[in-house]
Image (cartoon, rainbow, N blue to C red):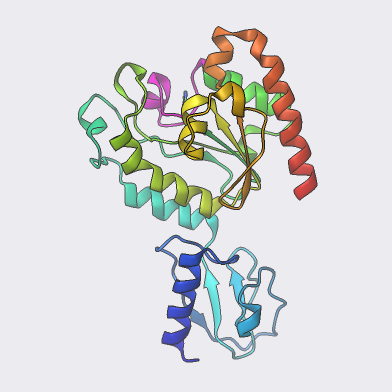
Amino acid sequence: MDRDQLVEHLKFAAELGVPGTSRDQAWRIRTVQTTREPVEPASVGFAATGISVLDVRDAASGDSGQPVVLLRSAAEVLETIRVEIGPACTRCKLHALGRTQVVFGVGNPEAALMFVGEAPGADEDEQGVPFVGRAGQLLTDIIEKGLQIPRKDVYIANVIKCRPPQNRNPEPDEVEQCEPFLFRQIDAIKPRVIVALGKFGAQTLLRTTEPISKIRGRVFDYRGAKLIPTFHPAYLLRNPPAKREVWEDMKLVSRLLGESA
Ligand code: URA
């Protein structure tokens, strides 16, 4: 197999979502030649083809003459997606409806746990960071006091990245434009567990109209992760007794993280 064939093969496998690749079209594939000692690939794909695939995060050195494909780190892929969205995205009408900035996402690009909310609110729109208002403070408590994980170790994003006016629900055309970027974020991060926050986030990701009260606390297979819907922190601020159910859901999240570690 020559280099061009190898590149085509990897692109095709990436499209299919073969483990060790990404559906992110922006992956840069390059070969390296090195005289250093061979290393054991830490993340290997295409075993059947005999092609070594090192994730750049794990690549301490190259190999002994065989072409080695270095795939970009999750952080680099996320940065590519951020750049592609651009600071002044105009793909949907929200850019003309009073949003200040795109709120991309925050946290550890290699997080095992990811939270997905609905859309930025006023505080998030102002600061450019998801979940920093009152609901965000409660989410931080759920993560840090409940799950005992530093907030910086998880990844937090929204289904759509611009604030809808008066915090109305995102509309289908807005979701259609923005959701592919969330999918690419998920594929780059490869979390083991995703928590979908609230009715909108959960119903959108799962393509369901089932009420959040019916789907919360259940485990769904989603883009290679386990997805658990739970109540939105903004709902908990209005309805504190529902924290009990969210606590049950977080115990499940902890268990799943432990099992898949
Ligand atoms: N609510 C959300 O769904 N997302 C945010 O970022 C803030 C509040």
Residue at 71% across / 35% down in the picture? Answer: 253
> From the viewer's perspective, is 93 left or right of 81?
left
Residue 126 place in picture, x, y as percent: 37, 24
Indicate whether residue 108 is drawn in magenta: no
| Above or below: residue 261 compared with residue 195 | below
Residue 99 in view in this figure: yes
Residue at 67% across / 38% down in the picture? Answer: 219
Residue 42 place in picture, x, y as percent: 69, 69
Front residue (pair 106, 215): 215
Q: Residue furthest left?
A: 96
Residue 176 place in picture, x, y as percent: 33, 41
Indicate whether residue 121 is drawn in magenta: yes
Front residue (pair 68, 222): 222
Residue 147 in view in this figure: no
Magenta residues (range): 118-134
| Above or below: residue 137 compared with residue 219 | above
Residue at 62% across / 48% down in the picture? Answer: 225
Residue 35 place in picture, x, y as percent: 62, 89
Residue at 56% across / 48% down in the picture? Answer: 109
> From the viewer's perspective, is 224 left or right of 26?
right
> From the viewer's perspective, is 5 left or right of 163?
right
Q: Give the quadrant of residue 20.
A: bottom right
| Above or below: residue 122 compared with residue 31 | above
Q: Give the quadrant of residue 125.
A: top left
